[in-house]
Image (cartoon, rainbow, N blue to C red):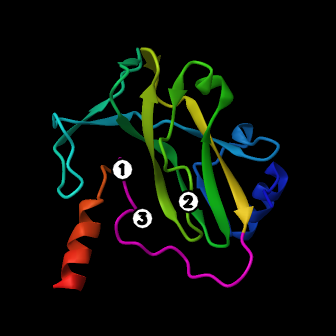
Amino acid sequence: MILSGLEIEKEIAKGNIVISPYERTCLNPNSYNLRLHDELLTYDEPALDMKKPNAYRSFKIPETGYLLRPGRVYLGRTLEYTETKTFVPMLEGRSSVGRLGLSIHITAGFGDVGFSGFWTLELHCIEPIRIYPFVEICQIYYHSIKGEYEPYSSGKYQNNKGVQPSMLYLDFEKQKSQVG
């Protein structure tokens, strides 16, 4: 079951959901709009490798905007820190953003119960588009969970502070230590 906007607000008051900073004007009937922070990250490698950390650079989005180009992935993050203790968070782009050909995640819109941190956004566009810092770019919504569960506790992305590149290479290192 998806929580209504008013239920999200009640769960914030109970401490089961954290959205910080919280602005009531961002609350929707069954979601909450999250804003794009002013930092972006792009990879500097001509070909990305899953088994190693890939070189990247980060930069600020100026107030005048930044032009995204097709064929690249830009990593951003939400301005808001979120935390959930008893619900499954999900992230989707806003329809107004999608109608401009901008996607905010490639496959990582599904969160885990217990996640706390900023959401890394995987921005990519169909045609060139100018983006701006602090725009309401996506929406978070919450599902209830049935049954017993173990809260998310991965060391890779939990309690992150900024835009995070892929850390998939850590999975290969873990597999290597388990096999060897």
**Vertical position of residue 84 compared to residue 106: above or below:** below
The percent coordinates of residue 150 (x first, y second) are: 56, 82
| Residue positioned 43% across, 30% down in the render | 124
* Amino acid beneath label 3: Asn
Q: Which residue is mark 2?
A: 111
The magenta stretch spans which residues? Answer: 145-163
Q: Which residue is mark 1?
A: 162
**Vertical position of residue 160 compared to residue 119: above or below:** below
Residue 120 or residue 135, whichever sits in front? 120
Q: Residues within 10 Å of mark 2 (few under 14, many from 20)?
A: some
Question: Image check: 107 left or right of 163?
Answer: right
Q: Residues within 10 Å of mark 1 (few under 14, many from 20)?
A: some
Quarter holding the C terminus is bottom left
**Overall secondary structure of the magenta stretch?**
loop
Mark 1–mark 2 distance (CA, rounded to whole Å): 17 Å
Q: Residues within 10 Å of mark 3 (few under 14, many from 20)?
A: some
Mark 3–mark 2 distance (CA, rounded to whole Å): 13 Å
Mark identifier at residue 159: 3
Mark 1–mark 3 distance (CA, rounded to whole Å): 10 Å
**Vertical position of residue 170 compared to residue 126: above or below:** below
Mark 2 residue element: loop
If you read the primary sequence from the N terminus, does the residue marked by circle 1 or circle 2 appear first? 2
Residue 145 or residue 133, whichever sits in front? 145
Instruction: Say which quarter of the image contains residue 89.
Output: bottom right
| Residue positioned 72% across, 82% down in the render | 147
Residue 25 or residue 86, whichever sits in front? 86
* Amino acid beneath label 1: Gly
* Amino acid beneath label 2: Gly
The percent coordinates of residue 37 (x first, y second) are: 44, 37
